[in-house]
Amino acid sequence: MSDGNVAADQLRLFIERIERLEEEKKGMQDDIKDVYLEAKSQGYDPKTMRAIVRLRKMEKNARDEAEALLETYKAALGLS
């Protein structure tokens, strides 16, 4: 087997792994969508829930900074 065949086989294996992971990711995204739909059917607001999930992913300092900036912009626009 030449080096070209080995490289092609390795590349094919990488591509196949990526394809499997992409399929798993799609399944997970579908599951997440189902949870939001279930929550909505129970009276919760999915848009607000998504915002909370985003905030929880942030470190406290970054979250505090983002919230302070939002308050500053709201005050500048008379929304406070």
Image (cartoon, rainbow, N blue to C red):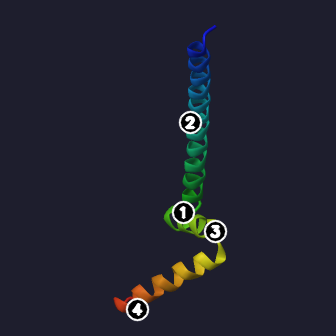
* Amino acid marked by disc 4: Ala
Of mark 1 and mark 4, the one earlier in the sequence is 1
Of tags 3 and 1, which is closer to the observer? 3
Q: Quadrant of the N terminus?
A: top right
- Residue 15 in the figure: left or right of residue 79: right
Residue 15 image offset from top left, x and y in percent = 56, 27
Of mark 2 and mark 4, the one earlier in the sequence is 2
Q: Secondary structure at mark 4?
A: helix
Q: How dense is the environment of label 1, judged by Cα within 10 Å: few (below 14), some, or many (20 and up)?
A: few
Residue shown at the point (36%, 91%) measured from the top left? 76
Residue of label 4 = 75
* Amino acid marked by disc 1: Arg
Residue of label 3 = 56
Q: How dense is the environment of label 4, judged by Cα within 10 Å: few (below 14), some, or many (20 and up)?
A: few
- Residue 17 in the figure: left or right of residue 46: right
Is there CB contact under 8 Å for labels 3 and 2?
Answer: no
Residue 13 image offset from top left, x and y in percent = 62, 23
Of mark 1 and mark 2, the one earlier in the sequence is 2
* Amino acid marked by disc 3: Arg
* Amino acid marked by disc 2: Glu
Residue of label 2 = 22
Residue of label 1 = 50
Of mark 3 and mark 4, the one earlier in the sequence is 3
Of mark 3 and mark 2, the one earlier in the sequence is 2
Q: Quadrant of the C terminus?
A: bottom left
Q: Where 78 sits versus 70, above or below?
A: below
Real-space Cα distance between discs 1 and 2? 22 Å
Is there CB contact under 8 Å for labels 2 and 4?
Answer: no
- Residue 71 in the figure: left or right of residue 42: left
Q: Secondary structure at mark 3?
A: helix
Q: Where 5 sits versus 25, above or below?
A: above
In this rendered view, identify the residue nearer to me: 55 or 43: 55
